[in-house]
Amino acid sequence: KIKYQTWQSPSGWDIEFGELRMVEPYAERIVGYPEVAMSVITYSNPGDVTAELVWVGKGTRDSDYSGRIVKDKFVLATGYGGSVHRLAVLKYSAKAVVCYLDDDRAKEYPDMLQYTGMWPKTDELDEVTFGFNLTNRQGGKLRNLLEAGKKVVMHGKVEGIGLESYFMDVVVAHIRGSELPDEELVFSAHLDHPKESANDNASGSAAILDIARSLKTLIDSGRMQPPKRSLRFIWVPEWYGTMAYIDKHPEMKGPELGGKFLANMNLDMVGENLELLHSKLILTRTPDSLPSVVNDVVENMAQMVDRMNVRTPRGSLSAFNFRTTPYSGGSDHMMFIERKIPAVMFSHSPDYTHHTSEDTPDKVDPVELERCEIIAAAAMLYLANLETEQAAELTYLAASNSVGRLSAAFGKAFQQLSAATNGITDKNWAEGQNILDYTLQIEMQTVSSVLNFNNDNATHRLVKKFRYEFQRQYKFYSELLKEAAKGRGAELDSPAALQINLDDRVPERKTRGPLDFGLPESALSESEAAWYTSPEFNLNGSARFELVNFINSKNTVWEIRNALSAEFEPKDLKAIAHYIEDLVKIGVIKWK
């Protein structure tokens, strides 16, 4: 029942035994805990139920229960366990739920079961019963019996404490800097998922432990000097533990907020065997709200590893395969980014074993683990020790990449014109110019972020030169865009007339950290929350995250709309305003 900013901490949970049996039409043991650890839905309470089984399809919509009597019965469904339980048990008075995996993965791997959780709200804790996760083969067998007209009776039992008030420790380790110990770079990995969870995320947790151990061994033996800046390693319960830790340590903030935390490497699923899982390493960049050379350093280190022949005993012979992608959420890097600490996430995709019983150690490749460790450790040590000469090299690298991104922005802006239909060329020109405007700001900030790691006069002078060059390039592309717009029938001399501030209200944050994923919908009335399922609302999770990041007590609603439009795609001002107004309504934002 403890809350950190907008994040409601989940309950503790402890069970000792779980078993699901079929009693009719014949006796059969279906699944049991602890031998299949994911078989009991996380956050199930103890209970002992013998009842008839009822099929409800996906079980996550009210319509799934229409015409079906589920009161005092087991429910069989293919939806997510917690969502099914919330409707079947809490609303329609079923006794317990049985869920099975029924997607494309399940068709190929019919003996794989999915990890799901109840995730009860505070006011639901006393009403939670229990549930089981089954494989597609097991669930399909029960469904076939029901559809054949058989009466199916199940006996389910869960023993133990169940939901309880408890705590989880955030484990922290430090390597103190020799010259600038107050400036820190942070490695993070979450360690909280139930067995099996080898790649997600025993791999990331083991990787940063190995990095910490290796560096300490090298330093203690005198083979390596301590880094000039401090390194911090944290092992957290995903999201909730990171939010709690950052909330208890307000000093954890980046230079933009006056802090001394300069970078984060978040390792989440970093050991995938690329050939077994048909996967690749994904290096997720910081978003436009936090431009940083940290992205350039990590990508450069990945390119270095790509040229290396990393091999380990019992490791694979797979070729390295990585991609650098725009920002997306899904892990603890979100919390660091919101605190303006540049954070890059290391992960792998696709991975069919994600959150399933197939996420086992045999899918972990020591070679891929070592590759990720080298990239993360090399990037952080490079930044922790950045000398003036290295800062110049980094500035050249960042500037070269920035020039490429400015060129790409022009291409994106030109596409806006190409998409124009009769009568809206001026509007599309304004959207294209907006892309160039914001890209210039981003790249100016990117090259300037070198100064967070080396503040010498020589670095300042070099950064200043490149900022001037970016402005020159921006003017050139703006003129080209104007010529293209005029050639397509633009009536205005400049798009400025369409770029006036149409909503000059300035929102201001009242909380720290990313907003809880359920907000604002979960705090609104049912009628108010319905807007978020309407066609008018088209902000995905990354755009919502960024919208809040752009709320800095300076940007107007119009400027936030423009920033989001440049980063993603043109956004409707009314939708942006509506979203912010709802955040004001629930008390996490106020008007300045």
Image (tube, rainbow, N blue to C red):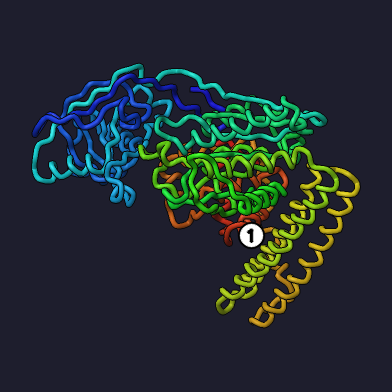
Please, is residue 428 above or below residue 487 in the view? above
Give the image location of residue 470, x and y in percent. 79, 62
**Residue furthest right as drawn:** 457
The residue at the point 17 percent across, 25 percent down is 50
The answer to whether residue 38 is left or right of residue 27 is: right
Hey, which quadrant is residue 477 in on the image?
Answer: bottom right
Q: Which residue is mark 1?
A: 566
Image coordinates of residue 385 in percent, x first then y, are: 78, 39
Front position in the image: 243 or 20:
20
Residue 589 in percent (x, y) is at: 61, 39
444 vs 61, nearest the viewer: 444
Is residue 490 placed above or below 524 in the rendered structure? below
Res. 81 in view: yes
What's the residue at 26%, 27% (across, down)?
Answer: 32
The three-letter code of the residue at mark 1 reads Ala
Residue 498 versus residue 582 in the image, above or below: below
Q: Is residue 167 left or right of residue 418?
A: left
